Image (cartoon, rainbow, N blue to C red):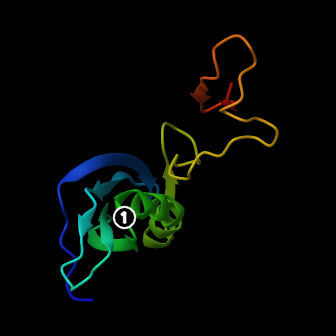
Amino acid sequence: MGDTVMTEVIAERSLSVVTPDGKAGSLTVQVGKPARDSSPGGDWYCPYRIVGLGRDRIRRVFGIDPLQTLQFLLVVLEPEVRRFASDVELSWLGEADLGLKPWLAKEGNDPYQSDGGDKGSACVTPGDLLC
């Protein structure tokens, strides 16, 4: 696969780290802009970078188009971050949930179905996901 090159950063998150000996630090997760793979007939890829704990890792996920690469990235990103920092405690905004997983509608909530009050628009919130 060769060296993965980081493209323009389109999203970034800083996570808090606490080492086993109690030292505080941070870990940065960056998402690069999806790009076309250079191989003939190549699909798209989306690079991501994890920096912290004295390490720097750049990897990528592939998809048929830019949107699919971002969808795949959201599936693999949190497990990758947790593997990268498996020896420390991670948090985001003081919570163990790093906010890196894709949000899913609760069963029975259809964001495209109107309840009559707002012409079918869906409101996404961390607490209720869809309201």
* Mark 1 surroundings within 10 Å by alpha-carbon count, few (fewer than 14), some (14 through 19), many (20 or more): some
Front residue of 25/38: it is 38
Residue 94 x %, y % = 52, 38
Residue 120 x %, y % = 64, 22
The number of discs equals 1
Q: Quadrant of the N terminus?
A: bottom left
The quadrant holding residue 41 is bottom left
The quadrant holding residue 32 is bottom left
Q: Residue at x 31, y 56 (%)?
A: 31
The quadrant holding residue 23 is bottom left
Q: Is residue 76 placed above or below 125 in the rendered structure?
A: below
Residue 102 x %, y % = 56, 51
Residue 44 x %, y % = 31, 70
Instruction: For mark 1, give the secondary structure.
Output: loop
Q: Residue at x 59, y 48 (%)?
A: 96
Q: Is residue 97 placed above or below 34 in the rendered structure?
A: above
Q: Residue at x 58, y 30 (%)?
A: 124
* Residue at the bottom extreme, as displayed: 1
* Residue at the right extreme, as displayed: 108
Front residue of 117/56: it is 117
- Residue indicated by mark 1: 65
> Given the image, on which type of amino acid does mark 1 rest?
Asp
Front residue of 123/88: it is 123
Q: Quadrant of the C terminus?
A: top right
Q: Is residue 62 left or right of residue 100?
A: left
Q: Residue at x 28, y 60 (%)?
A: 34
* Residue at the top extreme, as displayed: 117
Q: Is residue 105 left or right of residue 83?
A: right
